[in-house]
Image (cartoon, rainbow, N blue to C red):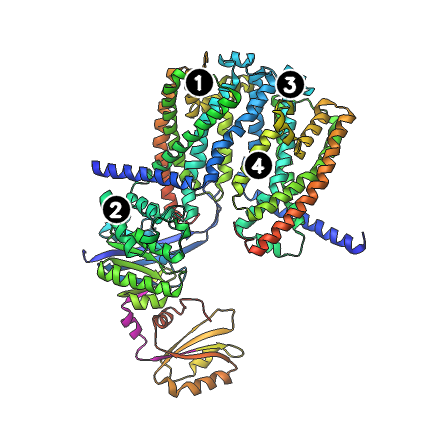
Amino acid sequence: MNIDNWILELKASLSTAKKEILVNLRYPLWVVFWAIMPIFWLAPFILQGRALVGGRFSESFGELTGTKDFITFAIIGSSLYAYVMSALWGTGLSLRREQWGGTLEMILISPCNKFSILFGKALSDSILTSFYAIIQFALASLIFGAMVKVENLGFAISVVLLMILAFYGIGFVLSGVILMYKEPGALLNFVDTLIYTICPVNYPLRALMLFLGSAGYYIVMVSIFFPLTPALEIVRTLLLPSFNPYLNVATAISYLVATMVIFLIGGMYLFNFVDKIIRKKGGVEAY
Amino acid sequence: MQDYSIITNGIRKVYRKGEGGFLFRKKNKETIIALDDVSLSIKRGELFGLLGPNGAGKTTLVKILSTLILPDAGTALVNGYDVLKEPGKVRASIGVVSSGERSLYWKLTARENLEYFARLYKVPDQVAKRRIRELLNLMGLEDRADELVEKYSSGMRQKLAIARAMLHDPEVLLLDEPTLGLDPSFSKSIRSFIREELNKKQGKTILLTTHYMEEADKMCDRVAFITKGRIVAVDTPERLKNMIGKNEVLKLVVEELRESVSNVVKNLPFLDDYGITGMEQNSIKTIRMYMKNVDSHIQEIVESFSNAGCRILSLSVEKPTLEDVFIKLTGEALRDEY
Amino acid sequence: MNEGGWHRLNDELKIVATVMKKELILYFRYPVWVLFDALMPLLWVVSLVIYGMALVGSPYSDNLARLANTGDYVSFTVVGMVVSSFAYSTLWGMSYAMRGEQWSGTLETTFLTPCSRFSVLLGKAFSNMLTTSAWVIIQITLVALVFGLRINIVNLPLALLFFLIALPSFIGIGFSLAGIVLDFKEHSAFVNFLSSLLGLLLPISYPLSVLPPILRYFSYLLPPTYAIEGMRSLLIMNSSLSELTSLVVPLIFFDVFWLFTGIAIFIREERRVLKKGTLGYY
């Protein structure tokens, strides 16, 4: 493949991202919804914490994580979780949305690489999600207060970027698999809840191991292979004063990089596989 | 070889029915043969019509040629490229217009739609800019190019869909029922645009599928009849119509009350041929009778049917059409009529 | 009620039962969904309980004891989750089912039949409650086994009675929502928004006293709030009769109010949609 062609593919990808963002902005109600809603999902956890410990610091939490401030812990967790939701409900559903709209076939018969299109879609999702995540972080800090080491913010953001790339792989697989499901909502809801439960979004990995016994141990072993988990460990180490991670930073980074490569390559491979099944079964309309 | 833009050889596609995703596949062995041993050769610069009723397999063939469906058997070359081995080159050579107006982004403007697809078709930016301007002009959409497509009429959307298919100046156009659902006067202008501008002036090879016989008759250089996944005849409209001979057609719609209409028709010695269509469970039949000197036989025909207890609902004398040939060859009507 | 009235009622009850049966059959035709439905509330309870454990280090919170008469937050949260899942299944069940029928194209045919629309809606609501009950029982058993539950079994019949008092208001709200989605095409955004809002306002995993006062007023406008508090008092707190009365009286008021409002909204929306001719659209 020559360099000119790479540039054309890249342009197709960027155009896809631009188109997605344009279309998104033409549904202003949804933009407001995604900007505001996450705070409604986070608030119950913070209120529950306040009811149980009567403040923002928990001794028990401190013993498990090194930091007693469970509120900042949860704010970081839910801000990063936004990217999981975007991989599931954004990129995962993106081809399905084209199918509903009737445009799926038209983009699949263009000569540009399918992954240029998928990458563009994922890119637009992560741009929009970053916008929402920043709003969420800001709103949450304003309402509940967050205490972070601001000097490490740059490093933390680069870790988040690695995680986002890993999630692109998940988005690719799902976008293919979902074309075969009549009602993908139930599947996505389940995967969403499952990830939320096994990853350290609101509680640390050590809590899973402590309170679920050996089952908890196995859950943690699965969880660390999901990019969100090592990413949260690193970001919290960077941002929370005196945070004591379950995975040390070097291990977490190697897990994150490894899962990123595996998820991306695996995601592309699986997407191709599903694509072939669909075209054998009788085309993208016959679901 | 270079004289043909599309060659298919023994294409076969079977759909397995049964819903369900891949986790819980139902054990339902019901199959539908969508295409059965389809072999066609379409010449460069030709406007080729694929005529057949709904569900005959036309769309499946177009989708196989546009790499959206993999055939179970057979090969297909588009612009010299194999759809299985070089799908990327095939896609770069074709422009596709489908029926239905949902193939565009309604929340984008016409210009935004074209700009986006130009990028997907890897048209260099400078060329794309000029091309989009030309196409909007050609389609008469330049005044409303910056309006959202959701505000367009269905005719305008179809024009835009054609413009989109022309963006990368493809060798081959695949038009799948391009006038379906459009109002008659607009259909007419789209048809003449396809024939005069796209085919004659710009020299595109066009495969057009349709179930309107006028469309196939008036526009196409050659027509293939397709029914139940099989090609039953391929020729120019003129030569196909000659299969009926120099006959005239008497079209009769009757309600079958006592005797079967086929018994009545069999006893008319002066008929060269006939075709009967109509639903099985319905007593209303359409009979097309081919003969010379219709005028001298009308009286006798009407009497025979009346005597057999048939109620005559309408009667007309027509020139033979492609539909007559189609009915003669397949025993099937293109559209459900009574 | 005269003889004809009884006959009519009997017929409508049969329709409720028929709709329930149909909905249940359809539900179990999608085994994957059933599995997801069964597992999801369980995952939610587990994550709420583990979060609590991480915060206080034991199944008992002194602070909660100060706020809510009980420190046993595992039982506290489980009761909250159970009652709210019943509330949700009644509230959304009907509108989701309507939506489903619009999707599959069967809504118009259903509405062509001479039976009362409300019988159809009730059938849908009850079938939902039945499946929810099944998952809730699994949920409670597993949590009891893993984390331990201390529930006052003696009061269970009273608690059920209490729930029955709350039920008409849920059904009334369900009617209203079903009416609204008939014509409101952005259904998923609407449901998502409302259920997220309820997730914050209902005292599921915390007592109302930790909510900012302004939000608390909104909580007291929601019948499920009273249902959760009442069931909790009966099942884990052994509250006094006067406390219960203070919950029952507003519930009865809500029952009357929401049933009438729900029926009125549904009838009005149906008429509107029939006028516009968009009943079958989605």
In this view, the residue farthest toward the left is: B2
Comparing marks 1 and 4, which lies closer to the viewer?
Answer: 4
Q: Are marks 2 and 1 in contact (CB under 8 Å)?
A: no
Cα–Cα gap, marks 3 and 1:
28 Å
Cα–Cα gap, marks 3 and 4:
27 Å
Marked residue chain, label 4: C
**Residue range of the region highlighted in magenta in the rendering:** B231-251
Co-location on one chain, circles 2 and 1: no
Rendered position, A209 above or below B209? above
Residue A147 in sight from this viewpoint: yes
Comparing marks 2 and 1, which lies closer to the viewer?
Answer: 2
Q: Residue at x 57, y 20 (%)?
A: A49
Secondary structure at numbered mark 4: helix
Dot 4 amino acid type: Leu
Rendering coords of residue C65 (x, y %): 67, 17
Co-location on one chain, circles 3 and 1: no
Secondary structure at numbered mark 1: helix
Residue denoted by label 2: B129
Secondary structure at numbered mark 3: helix
Q: Nearer the viewer, residue C249 or B279?
A: C249
Comparing marks 3 and 4, which lies closer to the viewer?
Answer: 4
In the image, which disc is placed on residue C194?
A: 4
Quarter of the rendering containing residue A174: top left
Rendered position, B195 above or below A43? below
Residue denoted by label 3: C64
Cα–Cα gap, marks 3 and 2:
67 Å
Q: Residue at x 69, y 31 (%)?
A: C226
Q: Is residue C252 left or right of residue A256?
A: right
In the image, which disc is placed on residue A221?
A: none
In this view, the residue farthest toward the right is: C2
Residue denoted by label 1: A236
